[in-house]
Image (tube, grey):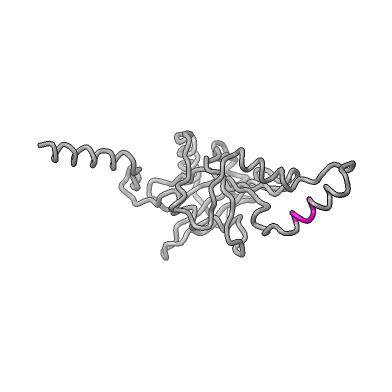
Amino acid sequence: MLRCFLSLTLTCLISLAAPSQQSPTGAALPRPEEFLNAVFSTVVDSSFDHYYLVAGTDSCRFLKYNYDEWIKYHLKEPLAFDILNELSEKVYLSRYPYFWKQPHLQKAILITRKQADSILGSHTPLPANAPPKAKRKWRHNLDHLPIWQLNVYSFSLPQFTDDGQYAVIDLNFVCGATCGKGITCIYRLTTTGEWKLVGQYANWSS
């Protein structure tokens, strides 16, 4: 009896810990990390061995959008209003915190926001009146860092249409006090199982 109870309890805990990978219509959806592994190269240089990723997700900015503007300037292929509207609704309904799962990510090294600030601060130029010795040390340390360690990335939780064919995500990166970019990307699932970028909007850049 005790064994049955423990087995049932374990099954319930596993069910709670593993989020459903099906849409309301029953379509198979990728796990967030699986999707991210397929699309992170949109903003991460493919030559990087690793990249720093803030562990907590950002908010996606696709809450509101101008359909005419997207059609005219930001879509790489025609997309129905219903699809964009559904993605926007998914973003609105899913504004809850999510933390990426390190074991399921390719190349990403998860860091806290405090660590991100420290990493970016370490290669912020020193004041003009800083001692020459300090400037030389700062330059030496900077020159010996792998390029990938100079950037920090933060992404929103991807949202999918109920049929599992389209997804939206915000991809952001910062490479210094006045260096970075944030974009909203829409992807379509191809017949070969790849996620193709079909829309892109620049939210900010510096």
Q: How many marks?
A: 0
Compared with residue 110, is residue 63 higher up or lower down, i.e. above or below? above
- Given residues 84 and 169, the one toward you in this image is 169
Residue 23 lies, in percent from the top left, at 35, 45
94 magenta-colored? no
Percent x, y of residue 54: 56, 44
Q: Position of residue 85 (x, y in %)?
A: 49, 41
Instruction: Specify the principal SS of the magenta part.
Output: helix
- Point 40% across, 50% down: residue: 31
Q: Nearer the viewer, residue 136 or 58?
A: 136
Residue projecting furthest to the front = 133
Q: Quadrant of the C terminus?
A: top right
Question: In screen coordinates, is 176 left or right of 101?
Answer: right
Instruction: From the top left corner, tell me how far across and down residue 95 is, in percent.
Output: 48, 34
> Where is residue 1, by image quadrant?
top left
Range of magenta residues: 138-142
Taking the magenta stretch, the answer to whether it contains residue 141 is yes
Residues 162 and 98: in front is 98
Q: Horizontal placement of 160 versus 23: left or right?
A: right
In the image, residue 64 above or below residue 42 = above
